[in-house]
Image (tube, rainbow, N blue to C red):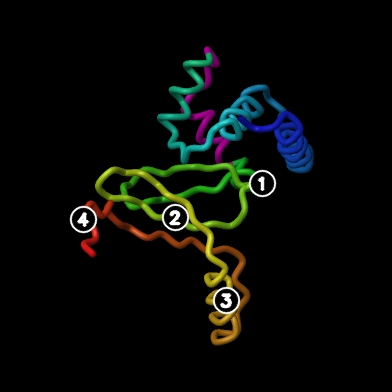
Amino acid sequence: MTCFSSLNIVKEELTKYLIEKKYRKTPERYAILEEIYNSNEHLDIDTLFAKMQDRNYRVSKATLYNTMEILIDCNLVRKHQFGDNITRFEKSFFHGKHDHIILTDTGEVLEFSDPRIQEIKETIEDIFNVKIDEHSLYFYAFRNTKTIEN
């Protein structure tokens, strides 16, 4: 569960963004944001829709899609494609840079962070004379069930 003060911070960020863009501050947008920040999953729209329904919060899938675009644009949510043609979303405001391992046999998504990736990013920037704003790194794997013999 997300800490109450952390949730208030992301709600304030959303409010600032909505005011800046002259969008309406609807209760649905805040409820969707709260559901995402209370989850530790990579949520797809269908799962998020079901979670909202379970909480007796009636939102349409169109509202979910539109709100996700807003949350992505204001950097509160990240969007992922893990190779199965399903778009997934995760919170991003307090969630540091990390990469993913997708287990193709189970669909499980593992997160990891390795400082060497930052070094690789800096090397690429130097070689190509570019500034990398964002990156996505996905490893596709299967759970190794072999035992190591001594």
Tags 4 and 2 touching, CB below 8 Å: no
Indicate left or right for 143 with 71 as reference.
left
**Could you say which is closer to the camera, residue 29 or residue 117?**
117
Residue that protrudes farthest toward the bottom in the picture: 127
Three-letter amino acid code of the residue under disc 4: Lys
- Classified by dominant secondary structure, the portion drawn in magenta counts as helix
Three-letter amino acid code of the residue under disc 3: Glu
Q: What residue is shown with label 4?
A: 146
Instruction: Find residue 100 and name its label.
Output: 2
Q: CA distance from mark 2 to mark 3?
A: 18 Å
What range of the chain is rendered magenta? 56-69
Tell me the mark number nearer the camera, choosing from 4 and 2: 4
Residue 38 % position (x, y): 59, 30
Tags 1 and 2 touching, CB below 8 Å: no
Indicate left or right for 87 with 135 as reference.
left
Tags 1 and 3 touching, CB below 8 Å: no
Indicate left or right for 79 with 101 as reference.
right
Label 1 or label 2, whichever comes before in sequence order: 1
Give the answer, above or below, for where 139 lies relative to 132. above
Q: What residue is shown with label 1?
A: 94
Q: In which quadrant is the N terminus drawn?
A: top right
Q: CA distance from mark 4 to mark 2?
A: 22 Å
**Could you say which is closer to the camera, residue 4 or residue 71?**
4
Query: In percent of the image, x 54 and y 72: which residue is there?
Result: 116
**Could you say which is closer to the camera, residue 34 or residue 59?**
34
Query: In percent of the image, x 54 and y 57: which residue is there?
Result: 98
Query: In percent of the image, x 28 and y 51: which residue is there?
Result: 143
Q: Residues within 10 Å of mark 4 (few under 14, many from 20)?
A: few
